[in-house]
Image (tube, helix red, strand yellow):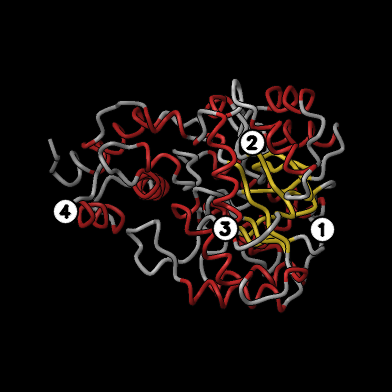
């Protein structure tokens, strides 16, 4: 099996403001390109695109290709489960949405502290283990944004896990909040094949600060995306790197990267280390745009969008009116769009954040950056 997987978390949309919306025609073309190039691994999950990622997978792949020509990875949404009787209906709904009789790979989705209600006191792991015995799951594993110690305790408790999905990229490798290296080492200790999610950190590593990008360009013609994907694919024990392409163009670019894959050299690693120092000196919020926070927000604030603008403003490091600030102002004028000053600091979003960002605190800075000193307005 080739190492690149089609991550279906951030599919192209016909309506950018409606996360449940999917551009099915473009997804079909992306799936065609992916399969034609010899790739087979499709990764989806119950909450992606409010459930429509699984449907899009069925329409693009299951209804158009023989079942033995692709593999599907889906996930049990621990964070949406609070009682035993919810398990079977959700699993059956997933099979129906995907249009299949079994899952090739199935994961306990983000088994971590904030999803404990879904597996402590609820036999979610035991349920999935039973489904594997029934042949409804071919390979069972877990994904997690927890720290290394938490993950190791889970693996000790559930030795039935056959693989693990972790957030790994060169920026998070030594990040104390993510603990990518330490989690990777735990997976290697238990000899579990690793699926990598967020290799581009939500797209952040595709658009680097100018100083960092120049370092890479001076070495070779590879774009920052290629450096990030090759970094992950070079790690021992990794059997799949999820490419969360959001367009046909991105899919074509990622396929080309993997078709011309060569492991990262020591010299390239030195450049990556320098790039990490540059980014860390400028990045403000390590948001990956997973969007888990959005559904929790009672004020309809598109938190990842605001954080993206905020990071870009900080990277520019100027206290003048910018194109980013202009975009923020325009966005605020659209009825129904929540902005930073709408935040009521309820903390519901923070509980859902895999990156452990103190979102209400950052929202105060976003407000100070865009709404008061530069642009002279506030929703208060």
User: Horizontally, is 47 left or right of 330 in the view?
Assistant: right
Residue behind mark 1: 263
Residue behind mark 3: 96
Question: Disc 4 or disc 3, which is closer to the eye?
Answer: 3
Vertical position of residue 362 compared to residue 315: above or below = above
Write the residue at 13% across / 43% down: 377
CA–CA distance in space, label 4 to label 3: 36 Å
Q: Are marks 3 and 2 in contact (CB under 8 Å)?
A: no
Q: Earlier in the sequence, mark 2 or mark 1?
A: 2
> In the rendered image, is residue 8 in sight?
yes
CA–CA distance in space, label 2 to label 1: 26 Å
Vertical position of residue 5 compared to residue 121: above or below = below
In the image, 105 versus 10, the foreground residue is 105
Q: Are marks 4 and 1 in contact (CB under 8 Å)?
A: no
Q: Earlier in the sequence, mark 4 or mark 2?
A: 2
Q: Earlier in the sequence, mark 3 or mark 2?
A: 3
CA–CA distance in space, label 4 to label 1: 49 Å
Residue 62, quarter of picture = bottom right
The N terminus sits in image quarter: bottom right
Write the residue at 59% across / 20% down: 121
Q: Earlier in the sequence, mark 4 or mark 3?
A: 3
For label 3, count other residues whose C-alpha is less than 10 Å away and answer few (under 14), some (14-19) or many (20+).
some
Residue behind mark 2: 144
Residue behind mark 4: 335
Question: Disc 4 or disc 1, which is closer to the eye?
Answer: 4
For label 2, count other residues whose C-alpha is less than 10 Å away and answer few (under 14), some (14-19) or many (20+).
many
Q: Earlier in the sequence, mark 1 or mark 3?
A: 3
């Amino acid at each position: 099996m080739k190492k690149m997987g089609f991550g279906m978390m951030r599919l192209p949309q016909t309506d950018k403001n409606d996360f449940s919306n999917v551009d099915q025609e473009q997804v079909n073309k992306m799936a065609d390109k992916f399969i034609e190039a010899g790739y087979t691994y499709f990764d989806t999950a119950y909450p992606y695109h409010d459930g429509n990622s699984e449907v899009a997978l069925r329409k693009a792949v299951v209804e158009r290709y023989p079942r033995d020509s692709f593999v599907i990875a889906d996930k049990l949404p621990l964070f949406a489960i609070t009682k035993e009787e919810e398990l079977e209906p959700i699993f059956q709904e997933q099979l129906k949405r995907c249009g299949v009789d079994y899952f090739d790979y199935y994961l306990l989705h983000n088994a971590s502290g904030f999803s404990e209600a879904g597996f402590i006191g609820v036999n979610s792991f035991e349920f999935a283990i039973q489904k594997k015995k029934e042949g409804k799951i071919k390979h069972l594993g877990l994904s997690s944004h927890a720290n290394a110690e938490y993950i190791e305790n889970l693996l000790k408790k559930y030795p039935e896990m056959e693989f693990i999905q972790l957030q790994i990229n060169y920026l998070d490798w030594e990040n104390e909040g993510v603990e990518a290296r330490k989690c990777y080492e735990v997976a290697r200790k238990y000899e579990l094949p690793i699926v990598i999610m967020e290799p581009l950190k939500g797209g952040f590593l595709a658009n680097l600060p100018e100083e960092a990008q120049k370092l890479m360009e001076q070495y070779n013609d590879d774009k920052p995306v290629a450096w990030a994907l090759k970094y992950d694919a070079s790690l021992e024990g990794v059997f799949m790197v999820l490419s969360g392409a959001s367009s046909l163009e991105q899919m074509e670019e990622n396929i080309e990267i993997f078709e011309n894959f060569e492991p990262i050299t020591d010299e390239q690693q030195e450049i990556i280390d320098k790039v990490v120092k540059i980014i860390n000196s400028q990045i403000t919020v390590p948001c990956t745009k997973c969007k888990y926070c959005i559904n929790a927000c009672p004020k309809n604030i598109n938190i990842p969008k605001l954080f993206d603008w905020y990071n870009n403003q900080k990277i520019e490091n100027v206290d003048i009116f910018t194109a980013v600030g202009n975009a923020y102002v325009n966005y605020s004028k659209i009825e129904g769009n929540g902005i930073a000053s709408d935040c009521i600091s309820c903390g519901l979003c923070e509980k859902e954040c895999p990156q452990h960002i103190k979102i209400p605190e950052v929202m105060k800075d976003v407000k100070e950056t865009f709404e008061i000193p530069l642009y002279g307005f506030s929703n208060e």
